[in-house]
Image (spheres, rainbow, N blue to C red):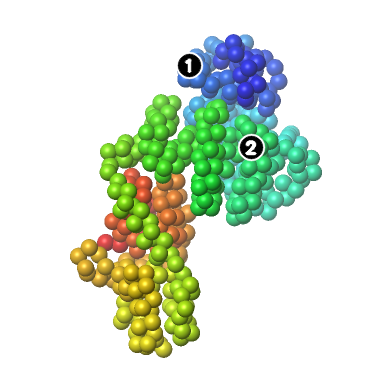
Amino acid sequence: MDDILDDNKTTGVREVLLEAGSGELNRDVFEKVAVIATYSDKCVEDLEGLLSDWDNFSESLSKESSAILEGYCSLLLEDVDHAEGVLKGQKRSEWGAYYLARTYMAKNQAAAALKVIEAVHDKVSDSLPRSYLLVELYLKDGNVDEASKLLDKLKKVDDNSTDFLFHSGLHLERIGEYHDAIDSYRQTVAKDEHYAEAYFRLGYLLDLHGTEADEANEEAVAAYESCVKATPIHTCAVVNLALLYEDRERYHDAIKCYETVLHRFPNHPRANLYLGDAQASTRMFYDKDQERKADKHSQVLKIPVSDFELSVRSRNCLQKMNIESLGDLIMKTEQELLSYKNFGETSLAEIKEMLGQKGLRLGQGLENKSGEVPSGRNPLEATASPEVLDRPIGELDLSVRSRRCMERLDVRTVRDLINKTEVELMSAKNFGMTSLNEIKRKLAEVGMSLRA
């Protein structure tokens, strides 16, 4: 990217598009257009102006190149409907089909994209960009075997390239090998410091699946920051970076990120929603001491009961009741434990002594502020379909912020989620009304609701 800018400091958007349309279209040409046309707000404005008067501007271009460049530039500006309309007429050509498929991917229509790319197979069967796009489409469609076979073929001819490393990372990510995928993305950006999509995937995986070490968290921020510096602007990276800034209570940096997205795309739904939450956070008061106490309490609740010296009978009973941590244990009452087979007063006294060592007691997790003990379960659980209740949270298609809050709360299924109250969710760090409304809406779509 730097080389392109250095070589074209005096080149305007009009000039670079005229040059692109007068020769053969290839990957380098499209990369140059992307870098120059989206380098600054002024460049973007120039591009928008050219697109609004494209018929007059493109008179000196060939008909095919003109249509493909018009569709490609519309895609750069995220005007996917216009891009689709223009590129449909060029779906029989290599680059027309390629960017039409990219347009369908931007619209979350992977099946349509796959159909377009497979239709030009005979014409461009040896095209590396097409082959790598097919890998992405197979993975999106859940066809991991086909993606794996294609990657094996690509390894024989292109295994040293950054594209191969990146798409190997996508494959590893799809099969759940997250740490290996992270390593693959690290290798990609080590070889090409301008590979924006690799930076994005690296930041995303480190944020969701990296270790709790500060190094991993900071690497996620650094990866997103590198992605944001690339052109064209990667809006998802900017929004996700803002969320990480919020995690670090850098609310003004987060606000700046959201405003950057909205400056370019005023109707961006997530940026509009999250900006309000970030602005509200700058006016909120946080009790640092209270927060540290809450974090310490949370760590105590995660201690496994196996860390304590218990009798064989007590240990076996807890294991059969699926009680793995102190947090699980304080959700039980004395009556519940005593009602279990082979669990007597001796075991009860042993358990109470163990909890007392950590300042805890049975039933503590069920108590609300008024001291009452609710049932702790959502009545919907008894009547809902197990297929709905056992659906992974990932299938609800939540926003990044809500999904990360679910991970913090160890909510993995719809069953786990409906047994949370609004108060419990709102108490999670960075979980605001926007996220709560999203959760309630997603649950309503599957006929569920939060516990009252």
Give the number of marks: 2
Q: Position of residue 275 (x, y in %)?
A: 35, 36
- Within 10 angstroms of label 1, few (less than 14), some, or many (20 or more) residues? few
Amino acid type of the residue that numbered disc 1 sits on in the rendered structure? Lys
Q: Position of residue 78 (x, y in %)?
A: 49, 30
- For residue 450, side relative to residue 128 (left or right): left
The image quadrant where one finds the N terminus is top right
Which corner quadrant of the image does residue 324 belong to?
A: bottom left
- For residue 87, side relative to residue 44 (left or right): right
Which corner quadrant of the image does residue 84 belong to?
A: top right
Residue 42, label in figure: 1
Amino acid type of the residue that numbered disc 2 sits on in the rendered structure? Val
Residue at 54% from the left image edge and 47% from the top image edge: 216
Select label 1 or label 2 by which is in front: 2
Q: Position of residue 320 (x, y in %)?
A: 46, 79
Q: Is residue 100 visible?
A: yes
Residue at 40% from the left image edge and 64% from the top image edge: 300
Q: Is residue 163 above or below residue 216?
A: above
Viewer-closest of 331 and 387:
331
Q: Return the disc, 1 or 2, that comes first in the chain's sequence.
A: 1
Marks 1 and 2, how far apart in space?
29 Å
Q: Does dot 1 land on a helix, a strand or a loop? A: helix
Which residue, given by chain and number where applicable, does mark 2 sit on? 189
Q: Are marks 1 and 2 in contact (CB under 8 Å)?
A: no
Q: Position of residue 438 (x, y in %)?
A: 36, 48
Q: Is residue 317 above or below residue 69?
A: below
Q: Is residue 86 visible?
A: no
- For residue 211, side relative to residue 156 (left or right): left
Residue at 36% from the left image edge and 53% from the top image edge: 292
Viewer-closest of 271 and 122:
271
- Within 10 angstroms of label 2, few (less than 14), some, or many (20 or more) residues? many
